[in-house]
């Protein structure tokens, strides 16, 4: 009896140790990640505007409708949180007045170029030699990432020129990681108001641009190995944003393409800073300890929702 009990204990320890040493499980075959960021695009906008492209992406991909932003619900701290895998308390970007040489709260970790480390730098360090690029409509986005981490860095004054250049970049360079930012939906929200016909028209325009980008990915010959993520920085209320309301502090995030479940609604809680962690997860990268974001694993084939929801 004692021998049987001792044998059971030894086997239990052996199996437990082996499980603890199992390597991290990742999605397989994702070679490219394209992030399409639409400033000020709310879940209400996607649901009520004419968005056939995003509707198809949702039907053939995974969606999280109530992604929580960071506070305040302004652009700089939310775009920063998305690419930095952490919140304002960590990266120190607390408002739109933040500049690299003029801020009140230093980052808890200063990486390359003296800013909190972003997904751009993480990819550059752990996948050296790959193509990385950013094309953005809002000039302010350009100050949030490490310039030395990217091969391509362009800012344009309209959503159309931004899209045209980004598609050309995809076709010619086939980037491992590409990020495009559109600002016209936020403009419509401020000028005419969220939930107005003009706002919905701007969301529809964003949808058509997303469709053109998907076609560009297809024409580049990388469609079958690309993960596409559509996201936003905040929603809005009336003609503004910045407050702590669901209309302002909730966005939608769509994952589409390689290894993503089809027609799946993500159940786990998702925060805007989980974007960087999800990209790192797709590329099998080890994130900095200072990141607080967690990958959205249930969006991918072979991964379940957390048991402790």
Image (spheres, helix red, strand yellow):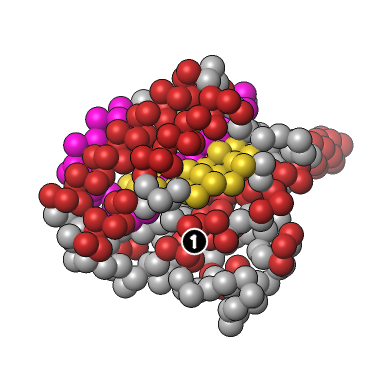
View extreme (left): residue: 197
Indicate left or right for 194 with 293 as reference: left
Q: Residue at x 35, y 29 (%)?
A: 211
Towards the viewer: 249 or 146? 146
Residue 279 shows up from this direction: no
Q: Position of residue 138 (x, y in %)?
A: 44, 56
Residue indicated by mark 1? 140
The local crowd at label 1, few if under 14, some if 14 to 19, many if 20 or more residues have their Cα within 10 Å, is some
Quadrant of the frame with the N terminus: top right
Towards the viewer: 157 or 304? 157
Q: Position of residue 73 (x, y in %)?
A: 38, 67
Q: Is residue 4 magenta?
A: no
Give the magenta part as a residue range.
29-57
Above or below, 101 against 82 in this view is: below
Helix, strand or loop for disc 1: helix
Q: Position of residue 69 (x, y in %)?
A: 41, 61
Residue 238 shows up from this direction: yes
Q: Residue at x 25, y 63 (%)?
A: 190
Q: Position of residue 29 (x, y in %)?
A: 62, 24
Quarter assignment of residue 290: bottom right
Q: Is residue 45 magenta?
A: yes
Q: Residue at x 24, y 35 (%)?
A: 51
Q: Residue at x 19, y 66 (%)?
A: 238
Q: How many numbered circles does the render carry?
A: 1
View extreme (bottom): residue: 104
């Amino acid at each position: 009896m004692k021998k049987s009990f001792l044998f059971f204990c030894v086997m239990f320890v052996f199996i437990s140790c082996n499980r603890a040493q199992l390597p991290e499980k990742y999605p397989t075959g994702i070679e490219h990640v394209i992030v399409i960021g639409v400033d000020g695009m709310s879940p209400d906008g996607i649901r009520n505007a004419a968005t056939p492209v995003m509707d198809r992406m949702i039907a053939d991909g995974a969606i999280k409708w109530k992604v929580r932003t960071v506070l305040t619900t302004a652009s700089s701290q939310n775009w920063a949180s998305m690419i930095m895998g952490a919140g304002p308390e960590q990266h120190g970007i607390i408002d739109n007045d933040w500049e690299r040489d003029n801020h009140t709260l230093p980052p808890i970790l200063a990486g390359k170029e003296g800013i909190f480390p972003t997904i751009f730098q993480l990819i550059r360090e752990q996948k050296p030699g790959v193509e990385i690029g950013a094309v953005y409509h809002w000039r302010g986005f350009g100050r949030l990432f490490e310039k030395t981490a990217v091969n391509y860095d362009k800012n344009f004054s309209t959503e159309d020129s931004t899209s045209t250049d980004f598609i050309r970049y995809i076709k010619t360079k086939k980037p491992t990681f590409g990020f495009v930012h559109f600002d016209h939906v936020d403009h419509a929200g401020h000028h005419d108001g969220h939930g107005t016909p003009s706002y919905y028209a701007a969301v529809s325009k964003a949808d058509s641009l997303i469709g053109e980008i998907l076609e560009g990915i297809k024409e580049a010959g990388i469609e079958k190995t690309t993960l596409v993520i559509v996201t936003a920085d905040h929603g809005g209320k009336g003609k503004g944003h910045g407050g702590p309301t669901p209309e302002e502090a909730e966005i939608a995030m769509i994952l589409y393409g390689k290894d993503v479940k089809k027609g799946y609604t993500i159940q786990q809680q998702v925060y805007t800073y989980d974007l960087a962690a999800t990209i790192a997860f797709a590329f099998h990268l080890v994130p900095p300890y200072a990141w607080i974001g967690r990958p959205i694993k249930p969006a991918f084939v072979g991964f379940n929702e957390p048991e402790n929801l």
